[in-house]
Image (spheres, coloured by chain):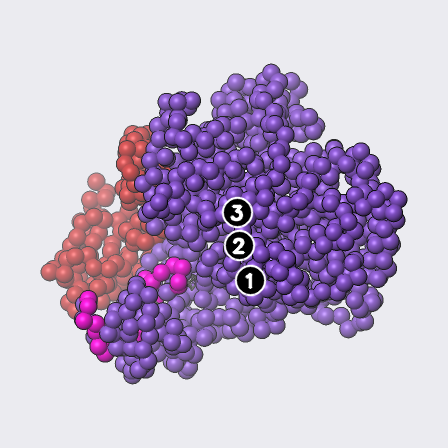
Chain colours: A purple, B red
């Protein structure tokens, strides 16, 4: 590790660090624009000049003024940032950069968090000398998320490097050359990349700003806290910002182990759920709004009456993967308090088993997003990262950009932001292919498949840091197990093969760890149907919408004497329950999610819940009237409400301490820094019981296998309640292999009837070549008639031409 | 000038080439120039067609098309006059040449004569520093220019077009 001297201070930095970063380590921040840790150095803005006084004995002798981002720190270098020559250069460069920049910071939405302002001041440029005309540009309409003000551009290229290089977008870039450079699209139109919002964070000036947050607040008026994204199992770091009791925006946080510097658009623009006018904000008994003490008292009384009449097992508790670790743990405390063993922490039986299997077996095979970025071969099996964990797609992209490669075995037509060999096998062949890979026996496959599989197997073996990534939905519990076993089979003494499973929710892993003693949601439902369970308490869970057999779930729920729910979303369960307790949205309370790799990620509370200004002020200024509700009647964190039901009032810190004391797997939780890198859990979960046998395929003549699949902006619960995303909801179309289309006489774009045991649906068909024949791929779309189709279920369907 | 972007033969040729090579992107300039020589300039449809042939997004084609000042994304006259504004030509009287052209043609930089014959554009170094000041008209470079010589050249270019 080289030691260098900067402004008479010595610093030792890891091999390969550039001098700009080395100075930063000493707290010396030299103005710079084009350098970005995730994007690398390009030496384009010419701002980070330093004077090199002594070169190094090793490597080329460097003397004089150089761009510090382009110079690798070497032992013995002596550098000055204070030297008049480089300071003067920086002053002039910033003056050039500012020449065409408008002089209207007060009306720019970047104001208050503008790097250009900061760097201009830091660069020593204060008074403008240029009096000539400035270049001006026509702005483009880039869609609902991003505003464009090209006049503010200083040509640092960060946006293109983020959008194209890092994120793989192809519809936004840099046009023209020389004095006519323009950053935009070929034509006006919505940016197509699901990572488009990152250019807002990347741009150091106000060219790209968050359109959904435009002119809503200055950053210094925002309440912000490091938080964790609640929209999928990856646990990316985010920084939500709130003002006037309203979530105003979300920007990317930095966590080297998870997302790095960027996030996906679902994580960024899925925030509207917290501000909805129809969000339930008061405790309710039936239709009647009541105070917290009354609701808590009534709920406890009702539960006690049922227990007195039917015994402790007559009350059941249903947690979820979107509730925090602490809330789920408090739900278990409550079950224990009432002496009930009937609990489940996920309503979907197969998702429950898949998560529990993963938590039980993953162990040292677990790989973080960061480890995937540094992998040299990634095999995706039944995983559609753009839709099931978007940032994972970018993690693999970085691996491929750095010289690695990737392959995909999946029945669906999976879009990926990187090149990968795609082997479209039918869903029922996925377990077989995992076994075959582990044992290296490919006889059962066709000649073409054999060649591809042998190639994949060879590449895993050659690779130094291979990772197998599976999707919990398609693989299910047995597939997850086979994937992890395959990773073990490919591990050798000199290097291990990693594994990752994309799970359903932000806390799927954590819930699975806690669910060891759970009889599983199937047993719960059966007992509800039999009338043995009389009361169900749902923690941020919506059994009406999320059970794969909606008819059965509805029937079972209708037999309950008492349905109680805690939630922050106006779900069907929240609307129909007998007793309702409003909880805080993720950004309103602190908690912990355990992400897909078993990493505990605690997050802080951004703001206190309250009726947002949208509602109280009707979109206008803060009202000068008094509030009607009693203080304290607002939503509470679920963990607090659950503790209160036991008559306890615990702080979160206390809950965390109890958790780590009683369960060694959570050791260190209470000491973890909120918004920090987090830490993997220390120990495994337990294997769930066996699920039902998969039905044989095809069960009926002419039937196709229905593959329901997660889709970005359409499937995830919390985001589905966020109006900000409405303009980009996916279209309701099913996809079918071209051959099947020919066989059935169905054309691309045709409207047909999809018949299943759940009922019929009129669907539009897209014909595809890059998918397995014999299946129909249907996106999971919430809040509509498609909602009954839940991913991960193996069901047959028939496509019928209209009128046929 | 034909009103098609690419002839059937050209389309076939580029499609076959694009399928053969590892990086079809390297054909961007070839396709754009073919379109330009057929059509006179490259309209939006030309950018989109290029993208379709080479399996690139229109933006990816546009990035290249707008980088080069000799791909025209707007209608131009039948002959484009590129006047070198780099340092060698400047030191040997390019400004005078430029002014003379503007005066005789009656247009300013970027303009096209009313008869649609000439468009005047500045350009960076033409590689003709040895014969500075120089201009390029169409694809022909002319060096050692004086206003008088320039008048003759314009005359000749105009006559050649009329034939
Ligand atoms: S738009 Fe922003 S990020 Fe892009 S080059 Fe201009 S200043 Fe840099
Ligand atoms: S990838 Fe998942 S966790 Fe990360 S920002 Fe997107 S939705 Fe959130
Ligand atoms: S940061 Fe070094 S040249 Fe831009």
Q: Nearer the viewer, mark 2 or mark 3?
A: 2
Please give the residue where the numbered disc 2 appears in the rendered image.
A682
The answer to which of marks 3 and 1 sits earlier in the sequence is 3
Residue shown at 53% from the left, 24% from the top: A774
Q: Residue furthest left?
A: B130
Q: Which residue is mark 1?
A: A668
Q: Please state the chain letter of the residue tagged with numbered disc 3 in the rendered image.
A: A
- Indicate left or right for A315 with A305 as reference: left
Q: Quadrant of the C terminus of chain A?
A: top right
User: Residue placed at 69% from the left, 29% from the top?
Assistant: A758
Chain letter of the residue carrying label 1: A
Question: Magenta stretch?
Answer: A36-59
Give the letter of the chain under mark 2: A
Marks 1 and 2 sit apart, C-alpha to C-alpha, by: 9 Å
Could you tell me residue B30's position as x and y percent? 27, 42
x and y percentages locating residue A469 in the rendered image: 47, 42
């Amino acid at each position: 590790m080289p030691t260098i001297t900067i402004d008479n201070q010595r610093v030792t930095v890891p091999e390969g660090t550039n001098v700009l970063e080395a100075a930063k380590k000493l707290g010396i921040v030299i103005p710079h624009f084009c350098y970005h840790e995730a994007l690398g150095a390009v030496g384009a803005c010419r701002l980070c000049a330093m004077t090199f006084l002594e070169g190094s004995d090793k490597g080329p002798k460097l003397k004089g003024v150089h761009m510090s981002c382009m110079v690798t720190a070497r032992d013995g270098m002596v550098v000055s940032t204070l030297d008049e020559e480089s300071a003067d250069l920086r002053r002039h460069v910033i003056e050039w950069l500012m020449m065409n920049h408008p002089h209207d910071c007060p009306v720019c939405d970047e104001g208050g968090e503008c790097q250009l302002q900061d760097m201009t001041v830091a660069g020593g440029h204060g008074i403008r000398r240029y009096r000539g005309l400035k270049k001006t540009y026509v702005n483009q309409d880039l869609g609902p998320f991003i505003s464009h003000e090209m006049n503010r551009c200083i040509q640092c290229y960060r946006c293109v490097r983020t959008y194209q290089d890092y994120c793989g977008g192809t519809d936004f870039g840099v046009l023209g050359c020389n004095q006519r450079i323009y950053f935009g699209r070929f034509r006006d139109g919505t940016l197509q990349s699901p990572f488009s919002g990152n250019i807002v964070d990347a741009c150091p000036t106000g060219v790209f700003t968050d359109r959904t947050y435009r002119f809503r607040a200055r950053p210094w008026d925002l309440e912000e806290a490091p938080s964790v994204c609640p929209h999928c199992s990856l646990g990316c770091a985010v920084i939500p910002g709130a003002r006037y009791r309203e979530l105003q925006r979300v920007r990317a946080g930095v966590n080297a182990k998870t997302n790095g510097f960027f996030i996906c658009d679902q994580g960024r623009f899925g925030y509207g759920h917290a501000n909805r006018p129809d969000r339930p904000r008061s405790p309710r008994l039936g239709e009647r709004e009541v105070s917290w003490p009354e609701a808590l008292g009534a709920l406890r009384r009702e539960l006690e009456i049922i227990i007195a009449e039917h015994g402790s097992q007559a009350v059941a508790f249903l947690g979820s993967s979107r509730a925090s670790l602490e809330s789920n743990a408090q739900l278990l405390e409550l079950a224990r308090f009432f002496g009930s063993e009937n609990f489940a922490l996920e309503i979907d039986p197969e998702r429950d088993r898949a998560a529990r299997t993963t938590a039980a077996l993953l162990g040292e095979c677990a790989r973080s997003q960061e480890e995937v970025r540094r992998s040299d071969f990634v095999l995706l099996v039944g995983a559609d990262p753009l839709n099931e964990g978007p940032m994972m797609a970018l993690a693999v992209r970085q691996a491929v950009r750095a010289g690695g490669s990737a392959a995909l075995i999946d029945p669906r037509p999976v879009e990926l932001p990187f090149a990968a060999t795609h082997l479209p096998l039918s869903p029922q062949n996925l377990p077989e292919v995992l076994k075959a890979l582990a044992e290296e026996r490919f006889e059962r496959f066709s000649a073409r498949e054999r060649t591809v599989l042998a190639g994949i197997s060879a590449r895993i073996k050659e690779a130094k840091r291979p990772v197998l990534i599976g999707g919990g939905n398609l693989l299910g519990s047995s597939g997850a197990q086979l994937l992890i076993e395959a990773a073990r089979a490919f591990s050798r003494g000199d290097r291990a093969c990693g594994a990752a499973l994309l799970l359903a929710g932000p806390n799927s892993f954590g819930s699975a760890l806690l669910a060891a003693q759970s009889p599983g949601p199937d047993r719960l439902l059966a007992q509800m149907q039999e009338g043995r369970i009389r009361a169900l308490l749902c923690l941020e869970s919506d059994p009406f919408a999320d059970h794969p057999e909606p008819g059965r779930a509805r029937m079972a729920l209708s037999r309950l004497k008492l349905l109680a729910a805690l939630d922050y979303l106006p779900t069907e369960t929240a609307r129909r329950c007998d007793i309702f307790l409003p909880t805080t949205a993720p950004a309103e309370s602190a908690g912990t999610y355990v992400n897909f790799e078993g990493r505990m990620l605690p997050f802080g509370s951004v703001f206190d819940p309250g009726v947002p200004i949208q509602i109280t002020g009707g979109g206008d200024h803060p009202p000068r009237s008094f509030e009607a509700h009693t203080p304290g009647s607002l939503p509470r964190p679920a963990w607090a409400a659950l503790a209160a039901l036991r008559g306890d009032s615990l702080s979160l810190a206390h809950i965390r301490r109890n958790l780590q004391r009683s369960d060694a797997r959570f050791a260190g939780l209470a000491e973890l820094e909120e918004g920090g890198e987090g830490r993997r859990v220390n120990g495994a979960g337990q294997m769930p019981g066996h699920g039902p046998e998969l039905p044989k395929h095809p069960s009926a003549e002419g039937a196709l296998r229905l593959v329901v699949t997660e889709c970005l902006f359409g499937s995830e619960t919390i985001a589905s309640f966020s109006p900000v995303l409405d303009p980009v909801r996916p279209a309701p179309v099913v996809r079918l292999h071209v051959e099947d289309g020919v066989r059935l006489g169905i054309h691309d774009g045709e409207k047909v009837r999809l018949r299943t045991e759940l009922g019929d649906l009129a669907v539009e068909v897209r014909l595809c070549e890059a998918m397995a024949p014999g299946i129909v791929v249907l996106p999971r779309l919430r809040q509509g008639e498609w909602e009954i189709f839940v991913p991960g279920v193996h069901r047959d369907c028939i496509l019928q031409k209209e009128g046929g | 000038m034909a009103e098609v972007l690419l002839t059937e033969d050209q389309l076939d040729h580029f499609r076959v080439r694009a399928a053969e090579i590892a990086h079809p992107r390297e054909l961007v300039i070839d396709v754009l120039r073919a379109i330009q020589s057929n059509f006179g300039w490259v309209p939006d449809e030309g950018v989109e067609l290029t993208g379709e042939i080479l399996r690139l997004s229109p933006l990816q084609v546009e990035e290249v098309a707008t980088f080069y000042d000799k791909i025209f994304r707007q209608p131009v006259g039948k002959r484009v006059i590129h006047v070198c504004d780099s340092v060698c030509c400047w030191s040997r009287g390019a400004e005078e040449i430029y002014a003379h052209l503007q005066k005789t043609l009656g247009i300013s930089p970027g303009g096209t004569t009313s008869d649609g014959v000439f468009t005047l554009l500045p350009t960076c170094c033409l590689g003709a520093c040895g014969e500075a000041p120089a201009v390029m008209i169409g694809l022909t470079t002319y060096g050692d220019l004086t206003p008088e010589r320039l008048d003759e050249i314009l005359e000749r270019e105009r006559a050649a077009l009329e034939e």
